[in-house]
Image: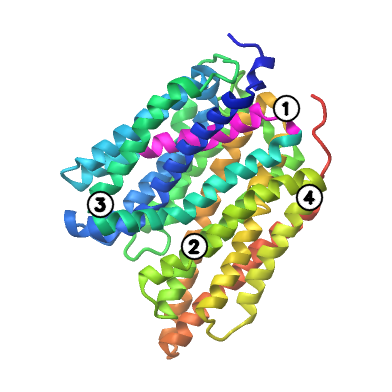
Amino acid sequence: MQTANQNVTLTGRRRFWFIFTLLLGTWTMSISQSSLSTVYPTFMRDFGISASTVQWLTTGFMLTMVVMMPISPWLLNNIGFKKLFLAVLVLFDIGSIIIYFAPSFGVMMVGRLIKAAAVGVLFPSYQSILLTITPEEKRGSTMGVAGLVMGSALASGPIISGVVLKFTDWHGLFAVFITVATLLILISFTTIKDVMVNKPSKLDLLSIVTLLGFAGILYVVNEIGIPNVNLTFGWILLAVSVLAVAYFTYRQFHLETPLLELRVLKTFNYDLAIFLTAISYVALIVVTIIFPLYYQGVLKVSPFVSGMSLVPGAVLLSILNPLTGKLAEKIGYKQIMLLGMSMIVVGWLILALINSELNLLTMILLAALIEGGNAFVMMPAVTLGANSLPDELISHGTAVITTVRQILGSAGVAVATLVLSNVTFAQKQAGVSTLRANLQGYHTVFWMMLGIELVGLVLALLLRDGRKQSH
């Protein structure tokens, strides 16, 4: 077994190809997550299903991810990273193959959930690995590159699926994923190394069962506002899920070797980092969901134009991510995150204050301002959070951050969509014109987002920018 010192000494070409393979795998999985919504109308036609049914490809994916994320530290500590990364790629490949040959929507859903399990394990793990193999003073730059990969995936997803669908049907998209994943499996045998010391521990099955509470909460949040939803079932499921999460939390503090080390929450800077990365993610995800609705509902542009209108902001996010990491190392994480939160707040403030209809160019520029601000907050917050923890807790820290970010991001979108539909409906009932009712709905969402992001600005002011103390 390698020693602790050897864990972080990948250098030169070995380090380059290790990180390249890791980030290419992450990028591919991120693309597969973001590119699918473009294909939903085709799935609905081919399988004869409704919009609410096809949406389960997203909802089911999200619920599975949230359950798998907290298990990733145990897997990292017990399996070894090389085996884990290969297993993730194989699962992703199998899921893609199942979808490619799926004779029905049910079979496709199985493939999608298998892929979600792979992504749920990889997303916290790749951040943990990058942070572990990088000296603290260079983590900002490394995580900036990771942010570039994730941002470019956000920008590329709809473009890649659009190009593939122009020349072939939806099977072509999964043929691309199968090809890339298979190549990555072959490459990984030589490029991926075990860079963390294994710390074997018993897998606590009761903790895994209670983890389902996170999925239950997320499921209920996503059902809010859906017509004819069973409210009694929703309340019962929410109560059971909250109790399960509460017991999961209690159990982690009382197990000798917890599944997820929640003692990381006792570090003040880390707690602030969790909420800052989540609040900035809420802003990002709401822009990507609500803005296209504004483009199509208010500005009456085509779905293609509304999708392409997201690209400039996503490209800016990609370009800024590596720069913000380097800036954070030079001038401090607190200053960088204050700048980022200020950009996000200003973007939502302008949207909230202008009551009239905004043209497409203005909306694109404001989306770019908000997404650019996100580059100064989300990955730097993850890095600052990791720098606040001892190295042996980094994998647990990134798992907690990614889980909380996913849950709060999904909740933010659900609440924003609910507010939009309810306010718009109430305005129409009051006899207001459709355009004015729509605008009032969007402006209510803009004010709500401004309030949320102002909380983030206050949290950024509370940050301590000192280097990690010796442990």
Region rendered in magenta: 115-136
- Of the residues under marks 1 and 2, which one precedes in the sequence? 2
Mark 2 → mark 3, Cα distance in angstroms: 22 Å
Q: Mark 2 points at which residue?
A: 311
Residue at (61, 32) in percent of width and height: 130
Mark 3 → mark 4, Cα distance in angstroms: 45 Å
Pointer 3: residues within 10 angstroms few (<14), some, or many (20+)? many
In the foreground, 258 or 181: 181
- Of the residues under marks 4 and 1, which one precedes in the sequence? 4
Mark 1 → mark 2, Cα distance in angstroms: 38 Å
Circle 2 SS class: helix
Of marks 3 and 4, the one in the foreground: 3
Could you say where residue 302 lies in the image, as x and y percent from the top left?
A: 36, 74
Quarter of the image with the N terminus is top right
Circle 1 SS class: loop
State yes or no: residue 175 in magenta. Answer: no
Q: Name the residue under label 4.
A: 334
- Of the residues under marks 2 and 3, which one precedes in the sequence? 3
Q: Name the residue under label 3.
A: 170
What's the residue type where badge 4 is placed?
Answer: Lys
Quarter of the image with the C terminus is top right
| Rendered view: 359 above or below 348 | below
Mark 3 → mark 1, Cα distance in angstroms: 46 Å
Residue 390 circle label: 1
